[in-house]
Image (cartoon, helix red, strand yellow):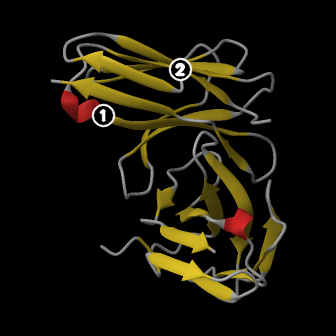
């Protein structure tokens, strides 16, 4: 059972570089989301999607873009990386965002120098 | 400012002791979930509570949702080293956003 798969697991970027964090799920979940986790702040919602072709902003969307062309994939793009984006990023999926289990990936640890 | 504040932020106790973790907000939530996260992994759901005043028990863990649906607590009886981890509460409101608490890092010493 693959569940939610995130790649890469680790990444180091220089300030100004761009990259895409990949997220794929094989559970046919409509709802997918991206969070960042920083010490003492829990998880904060970056962007989310309620289905293919539909995305919306979360609490901390600045500096990040997303798209949802298929039900399975929900990539997160950093257009011009900044040191403030150093964090651990988690992708999650669920049938319904407020009632059902959210399944999380193992995370991507990103450092921006 | 986080919508959900957890206390304490850090907790270190001896095996066999009891503990309570609190999750508080000034906002009302339609549901409240508790997750446990281990180092290097994503959070894993422990329980969902949806009714004000609801109490759920999962072996040695007892979860309570406040009557006004603004707060919740997690009580662990006779803690074991396997309970060590980061405990996160998370609340759902109207719309599709889900808010996580600040987290409580628990260490149970053998």
How many marks on residues? Answer: 2
The location of residue B73, given as percent across then percent down, is: 52, 18
Which circle's residue, 2 or 1, is located before the other in the chain? 2
The residue beneath circle 1 is B84
Tag 2–tag 1 contact (CB < 8 Å): no
Q: In the rendered view of the protein, which quadrant contains the C terminus of chain A?
A: bottom right
Point 65% across, 87% down: residue = A19
The location of residue B32, given as percent across then percent down, is: 60, 33
In-front residue for pair B4/A79: A79
Is the residue B45 above or below the residue B19 in the image? below
In-front residue for pair B53/A106: A106
Q: In the rendered view of the protein, which quadrant contains the N terminus of chain A?
A: bottom left
Q: Residue furthest front?
A: A113
For residue A83, which quarter of the picture? Answer: bottom right
For residue A53, which quarter of the picture? Answer: bottom right
The residue beneath circle 2 is B8
The location of residue B98, given as percent across then percent down, is: 69, 48
The location of residue B69, given as percent across then percent down, is: 70, 21
Say few, some or many: other residues with alpha carbon within 10 Å of mark 1 (under 14 / 14 to 19 / 20 or more): some
Residue A112 in view, yes or no? yes
Helix, strand or loop for disc 1:
loop
Point 60% across, 30% down: residue = B50
Host chain of mark 1: B
């Amino acid at each position: 059972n693959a569940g939610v798969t995130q790649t890469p697991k680790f990444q180091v970027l220089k300030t100004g570089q761009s990259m895409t964090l990949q997220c794929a799920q094989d559970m046919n979940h409509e709802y997918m989301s991206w969070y960042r986790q920083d010490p003492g702040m829990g998880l904060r919602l970056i962007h989310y999607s309620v289905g293919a072709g539909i995305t919306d902003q979360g609490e901390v969307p600045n500096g990040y873009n997303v798209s949802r062309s298929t039900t399975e994939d929900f990539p997160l793009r950093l257009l011009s990386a900044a040191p403030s984006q150093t964090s651990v990023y988690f992708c999650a999926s669920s049938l319904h965002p407020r009632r059902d289990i959210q399944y999380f990936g193992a995370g991507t640890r990103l450092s921006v120098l | 400012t986080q919508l959900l504040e957890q206390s304490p932020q850090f907790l270190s106790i001896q095996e066999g002791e009891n503990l309570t973790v609190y999750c508080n907000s000034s906002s009302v939530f339609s549901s409240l979930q508790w997750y446990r996260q281990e180092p290097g992994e994503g959070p894993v759901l422990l329980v969902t509570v949806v009714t004000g005043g609801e109490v759920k028990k999962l072996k040695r863990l007892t979860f309570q949702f406040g009557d006004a649906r603004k707060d919740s607590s997690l009580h662990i009886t006779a803690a074991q080293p396997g309970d060590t981890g980061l405990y996160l509460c998370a609340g759902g409101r109207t719309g599709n956003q889900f808010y996580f608490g600040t987290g409580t890092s628990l260490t149970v010493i053998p």
